[in-house]
């Protein structure tokens, strides 16, 4: 049982990494809003079906509806929009690294708002994770010559091979990534009392995803009327599949594996293994591009995981 739990935690990280890789292409094609809306609607329908068959509705602590609302609006809606915006502009490697900062941000927010203890080990983990992200983003991923060529050409060609191409000012990649991690951290703080009250994790996941999907459905007509919700390309069946697939992988498959691991092994170990997505993403990029990421990319990703481990076990 413990062995299967460890495999499940690593599997969740692997699925998250693969989902980020797959999502890069449709996210750049559709734009953050259209891409997020399609993913949330499709994933909420599947999650709702699972929850209905599991019969876990009775576990939901509805008296914590303010916390659930905050989680839906900030963590799911804003967090996903910022994450997709970061993914589109900076690629999956930078997005995963910046998103990994949600752990130290959550630790700091817990210390400020929940009176949780921020030990020296946790503080060291925050600094180590931050240093790892900075190292990997500034010095990892591609050669200096390649960066210069890409900066000069700024090719608009979109495909699975352009994982390291930066669209627009690099500062926006950092800003969107940090905003996404911050929204996720706020969501973790908000959802904590809901989960402590005994709410089934899958039911909570459906409420978050389904609630966000409803919000998107309500505001979409208004945005379409103002011309602000227009995909950059015409939707095709192939593009729809590539959009929905990473949503199922992340919202359903990866979450289910992580929940199984949490129920059968120590939380700290599972949290560390589940945060290895930035490292697992590197060989995937190597396989797709035929170019090995530079040493700082590997070192920074490893330092980020070690920092997350110190935080989780602090």
Image (cartoon, rainbow, N blue to C red):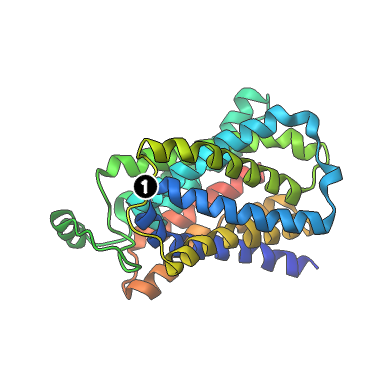
Residue found farthest to the left: 152
Q: Is residue 116 or residue 19 the one in the foreground?
A: 19
Q: How many numbered marks are there?
A: 1
Q: Is residue 269 or residue 241 the one in the foreground?
A: 241
Q: Is residue 204 or residue 53 the one in the foreground?
A: 53
| Relative image position of residue 150 (x, y in whole percent) | 19, 58
| Relative image position of residue 92 (x, y in whole percent) | 41, 57
Q: Horizontal placement of 117 versus 175: left or right? A: right
Q: Is residue 157 or residue 10 the one in the foreground?
A: 157
Q: Quadrant of the C terminus?
A: top right
Q: Quadrant of the N terminus?
A: bottom right
At horizontal 54% and vertical 47% (from top left) the residue drawn is 307
Asked whether residue 136 is in view, the answer is: no
Q: Which image quarter: residue 52?
A: bottom right
Q: Horizontal placement of 36 versus 213: left or right? A: left
| Relative image position of residue 277 (x, y in whole percent) | 52, 59
Q: Which image quarter: residue 237?
A: bottom left
CA neighbours of label 1 inside 10 A, class few (<14), some (14 to 19), many (20+): some
Q: Which image quarter: residue 50?
A: bottom right
- Residue placed under numbered mark 1 in the picture: 230
At horizontal 25% and vertical 43% (from top left) the residue drawn is 169
At horizontal 57% and vertical 38% (from top left) the residue drawn is 215
Assign a secondary structure to mark 1: loop
Asked whether residue 288 is in view, the answer is: yes
At horizontal 38% and vertical 58% (from top left) the residue drawn is 297
| Relative image position of residue 280 (x, y in whole percent) | 50, 65
């Amino acid at each position: 049982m413990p062995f299967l739990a460890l495999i499940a935690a690593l599997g969740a990280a692997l699925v998250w990494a693969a989902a980020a890789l797959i999502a890069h292409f449709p996210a750049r094609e559709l734009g953050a809003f259209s891409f997020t809306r399609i993913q949330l609607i499709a994933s909420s329908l599947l999650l709702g079906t699972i929850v209905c068959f599991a019969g876990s509705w009775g576990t939901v602590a509805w008296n914590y509806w303010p916390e659930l609302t905050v989680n839906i609006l900030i963590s799911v809606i804003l967090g996903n929009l910022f994450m997709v915006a970061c993914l589109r502009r900076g690629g999956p490697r930078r997005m995963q690294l910046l998103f990994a900062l949600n752990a130290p941000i959550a630790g700091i927010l817990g210390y400020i708002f929940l009176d949780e203890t921020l030990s020296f080990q946790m503080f060291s983990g925050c600094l180590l994770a931050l240093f790892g992200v900075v190292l990997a983003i500034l010095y990892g991923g591609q050669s200096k010559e390649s960066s210069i060529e890409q900066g000069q050409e700024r090719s608009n060609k979109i495909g699975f091979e352009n994982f390291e191409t930066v669209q627009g000012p690099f500062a926006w990649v950092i800003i969107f990534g940090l905003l996404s991690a911050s929204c996720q951290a706020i969501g973790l703080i908000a959802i904590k009392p809901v989960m402590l009250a005994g709410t089934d994790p899958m039911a909570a996941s459906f409420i978050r995803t389904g609630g966000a999907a409803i919000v998107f459905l309500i505001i979409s007509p208004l945005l379409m009327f103002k011309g602000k919700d227009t995909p950059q390309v015409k939707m095709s069946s192939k593009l729809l599949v590539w959009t929905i697939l990473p949503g199922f992988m992340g919202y359903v498959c990866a979450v289910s594996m992580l929940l199984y691991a949490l129920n059968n092994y120590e939380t700290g170990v599972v949290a560390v293994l589940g945060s290895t997505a930035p490292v697992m993403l590197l060989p995937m990029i190597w396989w797709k591009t035929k170019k090995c990421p530079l040493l700082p990319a590997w070192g920074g990703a490893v330092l980020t995981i070690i920092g997350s481990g110190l935080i989780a076990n602090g």
